[in-house]
Amino acid sequence: MVVLAYVLISLHIAISVGLGIAVMMQMSKSAELGGAFGGGASHTMFGRKKGLDTMGKITLGLAIGFMVNSILIAFVISRAFGA
């Protein structure tokens, strides 16, 4: 169980680095400081962009993997190191 915990933690680090890179690659010009004050409203919920592109699907997959791996790590560590 301890080896599985270390494998899951290593996988978690790799997923989190990949997720960070994927999110950074999706930032557009509207995500700069002007976007914080209402600029770039074309990418809102009902804006002109429909569906997810390839990078969006990769980001979604990494986010789901991150959540599932977090739950698995919590379960395995509680069994391996818990009293």
Image (cartoon, helix red, strand yellow):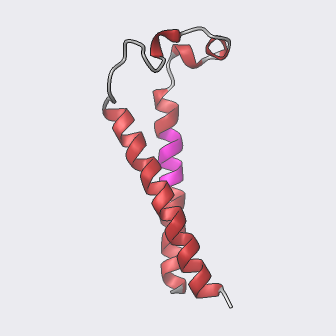
- Which of these two is toward me, 74 or 28? 74
Name the residue at 61% across, 17% down. 32
Give the image location of residue 27, x and y in percent.
51, 25
Depicted 61 relative to depicted 9: above or below: above
x, y percent for residue 73: 54, 71
Q: Which residues are magenta?
A: 15-21
**Was residue 13 drawn as part of the magenta stretch in this picture?**
no
**Residue 19 falls within the magenta-colored stretch:** yes
Q: Residue at x 32, y 29 (%)?
A: 53
In the shown orientation, is residue 61 left or right of residue 17? left
Q: Is residue 3 left or right of residue 82?
A: left
Quadrant containing the C terminus in the rendered view: bottom right
User: In front: 42, or 4?
Assistant: 42
| Extreme residue toward the front, this view | 46
Query: Residue 81's image quarter?
Result: bottom right
Residue drawn where x is 50% and y is 35% of the image: 23
Q: Is residue 14 above or below residue 6?
A: above
Asked if 75 appears above or below 54 in the picture, the reply is below
Residue 65 place in picture, x, y as percent: 43, 56
Residue 55, horizontal then vertical, whole percent: 36, 34
Magenta span: predominant SS is helix
Residue occupying image coordinates x 50% and y 83%? 3
